[in-house]
């Protein structure tokens, strides 16, 4: 086998000799009748386009050592998410991505962010984490479904998970966030036409602004939000915005009662994954310029001073100032 990999046009299974331009050959061979026209031969005389270097041998498990800190070349774990920036202190504009971005920072795992989309994800959804290694030959990819376990195994010394995620009360309050609060977010940002056109579509389609792609994607995102809310509410018809926002405010009231006068949820001494769950929505609702019907849930959230204070504490500690949070 050749030590190099050569790319040839698919018309040929192996390189063929093409006489230099300007020369002639006698038409004595049966193959001469099948010679390509001169312009085709001129085109393919430029091939192969690329000669790839030899592939390195596979790494052993001993050679591969993930690291959570910068190496001599400045490599760092990369969170691929819906974001406008490669700066890990700039919050994602997507709650699912912001949750993991926040929790990674809470657990003192340095990251940079990389703007991406669902099509780039091995699992089909964002976020996913690419682990830096001491060798550029291989990267480990962690999908969001396995990120909690990976964080637990690789968090820095002194960083602990302050919440028992198997506890019944945790699961009950988590259902409020993933149900009523998420539904309100989806309705305000994806179904309300004013926010869909002014916020959601521009944020998610900025890399491909050519018409009609934003319009098509906007319609698809809106329908996906409708389907998600219907599934969450177990109703064949879409609940009204008023119903959705009322349930969200009831959920925020329950979360406010849970937090009480404590600094972090469940009376923990440090922030944990549930704090990241709640922050992912409160931060976006309080800092994005949400208009239309979404103003109802935003203003209702502001009335819960302890939830607003909780959002501010996390922002100040792990992110840049709110004015620099979004581009």
Image (cartoon, grey):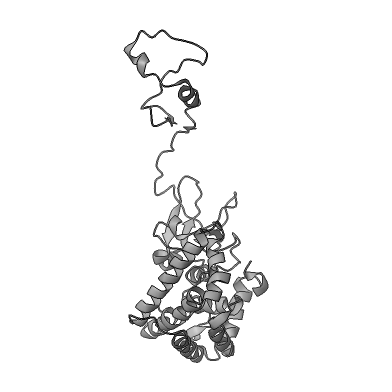
- Which residue is located at x 45 percent, y 78 percent? 182
User: How many tags in the picture?
Assistant: 0
The image quadrant that residue 298 belongs to is bottom right
Q: In the picture provided, is 171 more to the left or to the right than 252?
A: left
Q: Nearer the viewer, residue 80 or 49?
A: 49
Would you say residue 274 is visible in this rendering?
no
Q: Nearer the viewer, residue 190 or 212?
A: 212
Would you say residue 75 is visible in this rendering?
yes
Q: In the picture provided, is 121 more to the left or to the right than 189?
A: left
Locate residue 222, reporting x and y percent. 45, 71
- Which residue is located at x 34 percent, y 10 percent? 29
- Which residue is located at x 38 percent, y 85 percent? 172
74, above or below 202, in the image: above
- Which residue is located at x 38 percent, y 29 percent? 11
Locate residue 321, reporting x and y percent. 66, 73
Locate residue 327, reporting x and y percent. 64, 66
Locate residue 118, reporting x and y percent. 45, 60
64, above or below 194, in the image: above
Which quadrant does the N terminus fall into? top left
The image quadrant that residue 5 belongs to is top left
213, above or below 289, in the image: above
């Amino acid at each position: 086998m050749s030590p190099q990999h050569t790319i040839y046009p698919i018309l040929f299974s192996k390189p063929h000799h093409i006489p230099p331009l300007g020369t002639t050959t006698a038409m004595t061979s049966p193959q001469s009748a099948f010679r390509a026209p001169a312009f085709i031969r001129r085109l393919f005389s430029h091939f192969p386009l690329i000669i790839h270097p030899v592939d390195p041998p596979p790494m052993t498990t001993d050679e591969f050592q993930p690291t959570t800190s910068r190496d001599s070349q400045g490599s760092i774990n990369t969170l691929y998410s819906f974001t406008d920036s490669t700066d890990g202190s700039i919050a994602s504009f997507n709650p699912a991505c912001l949750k993991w971005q926040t929790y990674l920072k809470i657990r003192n795992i340095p990251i940079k962010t990389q703007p991406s989309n669902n099509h780039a994800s091995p699992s089909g959804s964002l976020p996913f984490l690419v682990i830096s290694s001491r060798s550029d030959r291989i990267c480990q990819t962690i999908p969001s479904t396995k990120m909690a376990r990976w964080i637990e195994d690789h968090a820095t010394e002194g960083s602990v998970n302050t919440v028992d995620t198997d506890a019944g009360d945790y699961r009950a309050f988590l259902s409020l966030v993933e149900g009523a609060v998420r539904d309100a977010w989806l309705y305000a940002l994806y179904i309300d036409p004013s926010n869909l056109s002014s916020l959601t579509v521009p944020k998610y389609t900025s890399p491909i602004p050519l018409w009609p792609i934003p319009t098509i994607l906007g319609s698809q995102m809106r329908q996906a939000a409708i389907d998600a809310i219907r599934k969450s509410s177990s109703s064949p018809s879409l609940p009204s915005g008023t119903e959705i926002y009322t349930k969200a405010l009831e959920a925020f009231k329950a979360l406010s009662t849970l937090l009480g006068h404590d600094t972090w949820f469940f009376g923990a001494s440090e922030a944990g994954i549930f704090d990241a769950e709640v922050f992912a929505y409160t931060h976006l609702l309080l800092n994005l310029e949400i208009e239309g019907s979404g103003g109802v849930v935003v203003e209702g959230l502001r009335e819960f001073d302890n939830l607003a204070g909780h959002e501010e504490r996390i922002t100040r500690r792990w992110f840049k100032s709110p004015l620099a949070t979004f581009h």
